Each structure stands twice: as C-alpha cells, then as structure tokens.
Amino acid sequence: MKIDVILYGLLLFGASLTLHISIWRIRLPWMSSFMLVLLLVGAPFAVGIGVMFDLGGSGRLVGLNAVEAAEAMLLHLCLAGTYIAGYPAVRAVSPSLDILIMISASPDKRMREEEMLRRYADMRLVSARIDDLRSYHLLIEHNGRYYLTVPARFIARTFLLYRRFLGLPMGRG
Amino acid sequence: MGRMPPELGMILILLLAPLVVLFLHAVLARLRRNAPPQKVAFHASLGGAVPVFFLLWESVFRHAGPLATYALDVIYCVIVYSALSYIYFHFYNMSETARRIRILCEIEQSGSVSPEELTSLYRTTDVVSVRLRRLVSLNQLHEEDGVYSIKGRTLYWAGMAILFWRTVLGLDRTRDKP
C-alpha cells in the first residue's frame, strides 16, 4: 500500500471536519445530526463513487487507482463514522458525562443523588428528546397521542431486533 | 481469495469486521449476563480483532513477502478495524443508553402513547439514578452511604474533551437542540 492512500484518507477527513467546524461556527444547521451525516458521509461517498467509476479502467486520480481510491475512501468513512458516533454527546446534554463533571467541580468532590436531581430539575431531559424526535419527523401527535412515522418504526424495529439477537432486554435509556 | 486482488480482499474482510464483532457480542452477552453490558460490548469489539486479523493474515499478508512491504497495510487495517469496532460499540451504547431510542422502542411496542404516559415512564429521577448505577458499575464513581465521588477518570476526561469540542464548534453548554 502506498502511504498516499492513508494520507489522502486523512486529508479528506481533515477537510470535511474543517468544513463542518466552519459551518457550525457560523450557524448551527437545522437537523444538525442529519446535516453532519450528509457532509461527512453522503457528499464524499457520492463523489468517491463517481471517481471510482471514472477510474474503473487504468485511470488514476492524484496517483491513486480505483482500488486505492476505495481504500482512501473507506479510511475517510471510518473516521467520519467514529466522529458521527460521538457527535450526539457533543450536541446535547449527556447526563452521564455531566454527572462526572458536576461531582468533580463540587467543593468537596462528593455529591448526594438528591443534590444532582435538584440540578436536573430544570433541565428538559425527556421532553427535549421528544421535541428532537418531532423535529426529525420521527414522531407525530394525533388526538393527544404520539405515533411513530414509517422511518421511526424502521429504526425502532432495528434496535429491538438487535437487542433480541444479543439476548438482551430493551435498553433503559 | 482466488484471483481477487489482495487489496480488494482486505477491504472486504474489513467491511465484514462489524458482523464478526456482532456475532461474538451475541455469544459473550449470553455467557456474561451479570457483567456490565458496556464492558461486554467493549470486550466483543476487542476480541473481534482476533478472527479478523487471522483472516487478513491468511488471505492477504501471509504471501506478501517481508514485513516492510506490507507494514503500511497493517497500519491501515489497524486504523480501519479500530474505527469500525468503535462505531459498533457506539451503536450498542445507543441501544442501551439513548433516550430517543428508548422512546421510539416504547412507542413501537405499545402502538401509541400519550405525552403523560411517556413522561411517567421516563422520569428525570430515573434518568439520573440509572446513570449513577451505570457509572458505579463501570468503576467511574464510588458510592458510600448515598454519597457519590469520582473513582475512575476515563469518562471524566471524555466529558472534558466534549466540553472543549463544544467550544470549538461554537455550541454553548446548555443548548439542547436537534
């Protein structure tokens, strides 16, 4: 393998990440998680597929043949995937990480559960998530009840099936 | 791999890695029912490297000549496998800890729910106490007579890194938007 494959994979990821930081600093996009997937995965993937088809024969792009371009693209997609996987914790409040920071920042470095609950009383831990789901059109309200849309049912069934395959009950959230 | 170019074989084996981790996880989850679930998923992600790298060795590297000729390929495989197993771990973690996934699964199982049913099912007190128990079982918190203190620093530093990254992205700490 040429070092160029790894370098171009890293370069592509670096460029996508820079673009992501620039856009987010200007204005947080609407449906930011979805936009992030489009930016880091969708766009490079579409361009990459086009380039690989173009290089299908003996053509080369920046010194890479089709298979090497696919290797560089896979490296980029894997790095983008790891970033996207961690993004929800950056975008929203993660109670687990917040609890650790809260205890560490407290004067005695120790806290009771009740003190933490008081801190969380004003935070919309559950209702903010419901708002999220509604803004992504995964949840609809009809006659005072919540229903799942078709994509949401697909997501829920995937996770239920996955947990069943692992022999585990539904996660506690 | 027959006549398939070794580079293509390498990509295919790496793409199959999450499936290997998934099957190993299904076995480990049944064998270690009392272990903290995140630890089991982490061990499955690590353990999946054994069959994947064995396959890579047998089908790609074994006949590749001296190590110097394929050292970069090994580095590439280590990076890609690590990234894929990290993504798998996060996918599992989402099924275990994500509030949105829990809400979707609850509604899918019951057909529909009212806002009151949903909030009574999933109270703030539950959100906090479930996480406290989880952090104790992962050795990140120590609990004595109802008082919690920091024990491990791994997740604490992850939290600090996330706060730093929020600043880089220009997100303020309390914002909780989709």
Image: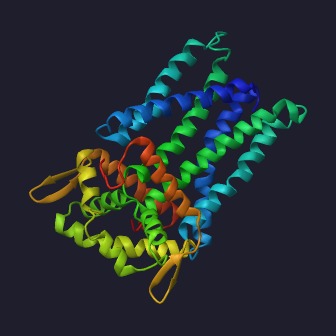
Quarter in which the N terminus of chain B is drawn = top right
User: Viewed as shown, does residue B85 lie left or right of B96?
Assistant: right
* Residue at (25% x, 67% y) in the render: A122
Instruction: Specify the color scheme.
Output: rainbow
Number of numbered discs visible in the structure rendering: 0
Residue A78: x, y in percent? 57, 39
Q: Is residue A112 left or right of residue B21?
A: left
**Given the current orientation, which residue lies at the most extreme front position?**
A107
Residue B4, visible in the rendered structure: no
Q: Position of residue B43 (x, y in %)?
A: 64, 62
In the image, residue B3 lies at what x, y percent? 76, 25
Q: In the displayed image of the protein, which residue is found farthest to the right? A: B66
Residue displayed at 11% across by 60% down? A144
Which corner quadrant of the image does residue B41 belong to? Answer: bottom right
Q: Is residue B49 left or right of residue A61?
A: right
Of residues B93 and B161, the one nearer the viewer is B161
Q: In this rendering, is residue B26 above or below B65?
A: below
Q: Is residue B24 left or right of residue B102?
A: right
